[in-house]
Image: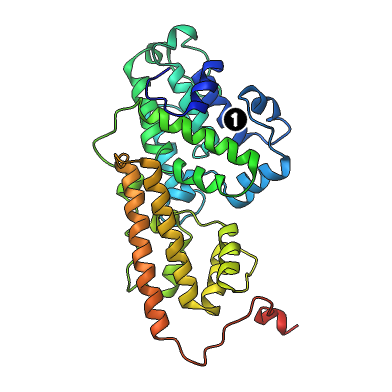
Amino acid sequence: MSAHLADPEVSERTEKTDRIELIRALGAIALTPPPSSDRLCEAVGLASIAPADHTEAFVLLLPPHAAIYLGPDGQLGGEGLDRVEGFWRALGLRPPADADHLGVLLMAYADLLEQTAPFAERVDASAELSNGLRMAPTEARTDPAARAAATVFHEHLWPFAPGYLVALSRLGLPEVSAWADLVLALLRDERHRHPAPPSLPLALREAPGPIEVGIGFDDLLDAVVTPVRIGMVLTQRDLAAGAAEVGLGYRRGERRYALKAMVEQDKPATLSWLARLAHRAAGRDMAHTGAAGGDETERWWTRRATHSADVLDTLAAQAETSREPSEHRLAPHDPAPHDAAR
């Protein structure tokens, strides 16, 4: 095992389970609904994830697609997916289905590692990879495979996975949190195995600019639910907890709709709460990176969250100053306007 493997849990598990197989199995757990994933969980020493929890975490609340967390609009597909598929095409390979899914990326990363020395002698270089990809024998044992693995890691895994996994761990689903914590610890160990590239990953180099004090209302709503713009991952559970924290009614529905309802009830309180959330996100980033400050990718996310927090603080103060004395604040038990009309 690498001397850089700082997490005791990862060290213990990788003594029992081959590192590459551990990465592959963890990817398959995210991709495979229970009960089919139960044996995979058992193999890596994790408790089985209940079907309802797997669906809630990986389908409803936090779909593990890189495009959502790195794309300029925070949606499935689009530029985020195109970047990942373009990587495989550049290698002359057919992109796997759901190419930007975290589970697929982990499995593809494991497959590429397996084609790299010192693992290559243990596999047939002409064998089909586990997710349908194939490398020619002459490619499998040479530097291109190692470079491809490093590219998958630094360009497509590391830019979004840490923030995603922290958000997943905070959902309050114990078995899902255990999976997320193990994957994050393993990825932090993998980071030490690949020299940091000289520049930011493409997704962050081409990311939209941060929010500014002069931002419009609709654009602010869009930005807050777009991780790469705001610097943090905002979940529906965050919104429900935030509404309770500041004493507002929570409107079930898509995050943008729920957030808009909160702002319309009490703009200063909602913006102040969002600022606190962004400050906490920046603090978590710094806690994970330690005294060294992490690599440039981690620092990018910390700077983005910190900037967003400062802007939101300013916007909250402006909203408080301009608040009308008679402004109505909807109580948590009040019905939504369209419900009241029924």
- Compared with residue 293, is residue 93 higher up or lower down, i.e. above or below? above
**Figure quadrant of residue 338:** bottom right
Residue sitting at the far bottom: 326
- Of residue 199 and residue 318, the one placed in the foreground of this image is 318
- Quadrant location, the C terminus: bottom right
Q: Quadrant of residue 220?
A: bottom left
Using residue 286 as the reference point, say whether residue 21 is left or right of it: right
Q: Position of residue 273 (x, y in %)?
A: 48, 67
| Quadrant of the snapshot with the N terminus | top left
| x, y percent for residue 272 | 44, 70
Q: Which residue is mark 1?
A: 28
Q: Callout 1: helix, strand or loop?
A: helix
Task: Name the image quarter holding residue 180.
Answer: top right
- Asked whether residue 129 is in view, the answer is no
Q: Is residue 2 left or right of residue 43?
A: left
The x, y position of residue 330, in whole percent, is: 61, 81
> Above or below — where is 114 with respect to 280?
above
Write the residue at 48% across / 60% down.
225
Q: Using the image, determine if residue 24 lies above or below residue 34.
A: above
Residue at 60 percent across and 52 percent down: it is 61
Q: Amino acid at mark 1?
A: Ala
Looking at this view, name the residue that lies furthest to the right.
342
Q: Nearer the viewer, residue 16 or 204?
A: 16
